[in-house]
Image (cartoon, helix red, strand yellow):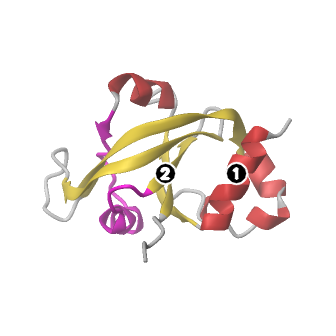
Amino acid sequence: MSKEKKKWLIKSEPDVYPFEQLVIDKKTAWTGVRNYGARNNLRDMKVGDELLYYHSNIGKAIVGIAKVVKEAYQDPTGDHINWVCVEVAPVKKLKRPVTLDEIKSHPGLANMDLVRLGRLSVQTVKQEEFEEVIKMSNEK
């Protein structure tokens, strides 16, 4: 019996590292996370887990899907063994971005970490939330 992969959300400012750059690079180390909650989420990621890619600050929208291609290892940009990173690769760009305002106004997504824990840069996503965001991206 195969265990379903977990879902996550990662944030990047589009003027720093947009989803389009991940597509060009084909993969990247997700470094620089210095929040304990977000770090713990990185530690829990497994190869194949899917990630919603969120553009923060500018745009404020989920714009793509990525996946974990290498599990947690020591972050080379950190000065302590406790900071980790994972490697991620693009899967696909969403048909259309799903904005934070749309997510906040959707009754089924009211408890999503993106709404409740807005500042956390690496978040958990429930399977049904992931599916609803994809569905919303395909509408309109």
Q: Nearer the viewer, residue 49 or 74?
A: 49
Residue highlighted by disc 2:
51
Coordinates of residue 58 in the picture (x, y in percent): 61, 32
Q: Is residue 115 visible?
A: no
Q: Amino acid at mark 2?
A: Leu
Coordinates of residue 12 in the picture (x, y in percent): 47, 40
Mark 2 Cα shell of 10 Å, populated few (<14), some (14-19), many (≥20): many
Q: In terms of sequence position, does the residue under pointer 2 or pointer 1 come before the other?
A: 2
Residue at 43% from the left image edge and 27% from the top image edge: 23
Residue at 44% from the left image edge and 73% from the top image edge: 3
Which span is picked out in magenta?
27-49
The image quadrant of residue 59 is top right
Placement of 105 over or under 40, stated as above or below: above
Disc 2, SS: strand
Residue at 59% from the left image edge and 38% from the top image edge: 57
Quadrant occupied by the N terminus: bottom left
Quadrant occupied by the C terminus: top right
Task: Measure the alpha-carbon separation of dots 2 and 1.
Answer: 12 Å
Q: Nearer the viewer, residue 83 or 98?
A: 98
Disc 1, SS: helix
Residue highlighted by disc 1:
133
The image quadrant of residue 2 is bottom left
Coordinates of residue 50 in the picture (x, y in percent): 47, 53
